[in-house]
């Protein structure tokens, strides 16, 4: 697999419309996605001390983190509103090869900060709420 540009891993937030439009969270510096699979332990006393896991019976969670610079754009205002109002919204994670993953996410953590001689920055951690949809790129 060839190298891909990290700057092309984009997180977009939906506007709640019908049809829904998605806007990139502007000025992102880093974006990361983590999937955690916690399989169910089906080990029994007669397993001879060997653990048996059932992958499909466990719980999967997904987390997306983004760090960026604050620019007064509509997408960032929507993100801030989702954090303050504790709502779940539709997001798209767009990969450099054209793949997309769309799901509802809840803002788990939102932070903003800045120094007297620098730009204001923000960070957000999103947790997936329910199943998502993967679409392969062209």
Image (tube, rainbow, N blue to C red):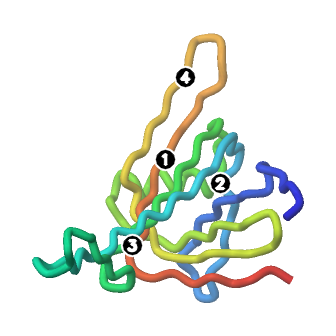
Distance (Cα) linking label 4 and label 1: 15 Å
Of labels 4 and 3, the one closer to you: 3
**Residue furthest top as drawn:** 117
Q: Residue at x 43, y 69 (%)?
A: 128
Q: Earlier in the sequence, mark 4 or mark 3?
A: 3
* Image location of residue 113, percent across then percent down: 50, 27
From the image, tell me which residue sits under label 2: 25
Distance (Cα) linking label 3 and label 1: 20 Å
User: Element at badge 4?
Assistant: loop
**Residue furthest bottom as drawn:** 18
Q: Residue at x 49, y 47 (%)?
A: 124
Q: How many residues crowd around disc 2 within 10 Å: few (fewer than 14), some, or many (20 or more)?
A: many
Q: How many residues crowd around disc 4 within 10 Å: few (fewer than 14), some, or many (20 or more)?
A: few
Q: Which image quarter: residue 53? A: bottom left
* Image location of residue 118, percent across then percent down: 65, 18
Quarter of the image where the N terminus is located: bottom right
From the image, tell me which residue sits under label 4: 114
Give the numbered dot on residue 124: 1
Give the numbered dot on residue 60: 3
Is residue 7 found left or right of 52 in the rendered image?
A: right
Distance (Cα) linking label 4 and label 3: 35 Å
Q: Which image quarter: residue 36? A: bottom left
Q: Earlier in the sequence, mark 4 or mark 1?
A: 4
Distance (Cα) linking label 3 and label 2: 25 Å
- Above-or-below relation of 122 to 127: above
Q: Earlier in the sequence, mark 3 or mark 2?
A: 2
Of labels 3 and 1, the one closer to you: 3
- Above-or-below relation of 121 to 86: above
| Disc 1 and disc 2 in contact, CB within 8 angstroms | yes
């Amino acid at each position: 697999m060839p190298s891909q540009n990290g700057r092309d891993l984009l997180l977009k937030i939906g506007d709640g419309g019908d049809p829904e439009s998605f806007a990139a969270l502007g000025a992102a510096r880093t974006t990361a996605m983590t999937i955690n699979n916690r399989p169910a332990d089906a080990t029994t006393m007669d397993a001879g001390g060997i653990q048996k896991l059932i992958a499909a019976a466990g719980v999967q969670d997904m987390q997306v983190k983004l760090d960026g610079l604050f620019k007064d754009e509509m997408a960032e205002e929507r993100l801030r509103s989702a954090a303050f109002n504790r709502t779940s919204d539709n997001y798209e994670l767009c990969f450099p090869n054209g793949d997309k993953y769309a799901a509802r996410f809840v803002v788990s953590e939102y932070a903003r900060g800045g120094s007297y001689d620098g730009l204001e920055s923000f960070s957000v951690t999103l947790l997936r709420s329910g199943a998502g949809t993967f679409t392969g790129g062209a």
